[in-house]
Amino acid sequence: MPCYQMNLLNLEFIAANIDYLQLALQARQINYEIVGEADGIIIKHEYSADIYIDLKNQRVECTRDQLQQINDLKVEYSRQVITEVARRKRWVVQAQTKNKLKLRRF
């Protein structure tokens, strides 16, 4: 009989581009490794369960304690995508609040 039980959550995580996801992970200083032919990413944790991001099925498996980290990663992923699109279109990105950006075109 196990002495502990770990409940995992299965959430939707839409990440169309693994390069932006890697930039978001690096910006958050999160240790990770790529699984297979870029099929998924495992976020390594020293003292808790690893987080698995399945890029093919666009799902993430984590514990309830890791939910905030996943939400922060989603925000950072969105920020990386917006910054790249703004750079391509020659827009200027200004941060208004933590989760709000303003785009200006000159």
Image (cartoon, rainbow, N blue to C red):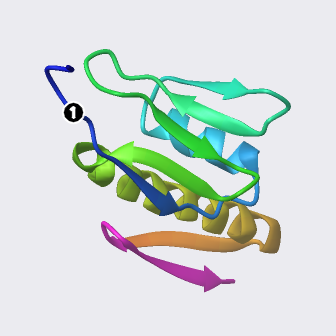
Q: Is residue 95 magenta?
A: no
Classify 94 as above or below 104.
above
Going by the image, does 36 lie left or right of 65?
right
| Magenta run includes residue 100 | yes
Which residue is the extreme one toward the top? 46
The residue sitting at the front extreme is: 1
Taking the spot 37% from the left edge, 54% from the top edge, the residue there is 72
Q: Is residue 16 left or right of residue 22?
A: right
User: Outermost residue toward the bottom?
Assistant: 105
The crowding category of the residue bearing disc 1, from other C-alpha atoms within 10 Å (few below 14, some 14 to 19, many at least 20), is few
Indicate the quadrant where residue 100 lies.
bottom left
Q: Which residues are magenta?
A: 96-106
Q: Residue furthest left?
A: 3
Q: Is residue 36 above or below residue 81?
A: above
Q: Where does the C terminus fall, quadrant-wise?
A: bottom right
Classify residue 48 by image quadrant. top left
In the visual, does 87 lie left or right of 41?
A: right
How many marks do you count on the picture?
A: 1
Disc 1 is placed on an element classified as loop
Q: Nearer the viewer, residue 31 or 102?
A: 31
| Secondary structure predominantly adopted by residues drawn in magenta | strand
Q: What amino acid does circle 1 point to?
A: Gln
Residue 35 coordinates in the image, percent (x, y): 71, 27
Q: Quadrant for the N terminus, please.
A: top left
- Residue occupying image coordinates x 39% and y 44%: 62
Give 89 or 67, whichever is nearer the viewer: 67
Q: Residue at x 35, y 28 (%)?
A: 49
Q: Position of residue 85 (x, y in %)?
A: 74, 68
Tell me which residue sits at (45%, 51%) in the image.
Answer: 73
Where is mark 1, residue-wise?
Answer: 5
